[in-house]
Amino acid sequence: MPTIKILPNAHYCPHGETITAEEGTSICQALLDHGIEIEHACEMSAACTTCHVVVRSGFASLGEIDEIEEDLLDKAWGLESTSRLSCQAILAGEDVTIEIPKYTINHARENH
């Protein structure tokens, strides 16, 4: 069972966290299952960027990134070369370390 190490984030997990999840689970679902309330405004349908994470280790082990995810990530705040939408990043057998960016673009929350 892969382990997800979440680096400290003032809003979601101030001291960081380490959780486990079944292979085939999205990072977003794993976080939610463990009480880490990452934003997911589109209900994990790959239609926004609110669940954006930066994968600090284990990036290559995640499921393939498709064109829709790549296009959405172009709009994410704090985009890095190892950014993923956590709702689309499917765990394999390897452990991963992620960072939840400080900001997100959530037009619903921002009253746009």
Image (cartoon, rainbow, N blue to C red):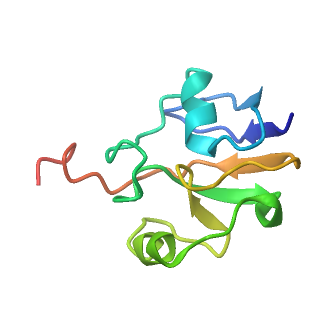
Residue drawn 32% across the image and 57% down it: 105
Q: Is residue 31 left or right of residue 39?
A: right
Q: Quadrant of residue 71?
A: bottom left
Q: Is residue 42 left or right of residue 16?
A: left
Residue 47: percent from the left, percent from the top? 34, 59
| Up/down of 45 relative to 63, above or below | above
Furthest-front residue in this view: 24
Residue drawn 81% across the image and 67% down it: 60
Q: Is residue 6 left or right of residue 1?
A: left
Residue drawn 43% across the image and 46% down it: 44
In which quadrant is the N terminus drawn?
top right
Front residue (pair 22, 84): 22
Front residue (pair 28, 107): 28
Front residue (pair 59, 109): 59
Furthest-left residue in this view: 112
Callout count? 0
Residue 104: percent from the left, percent from the top? 39, 53
Residue drawn 47% across the image and 49% down it: 51
Residue 89: percent from the left, percent from the top? 63, 55
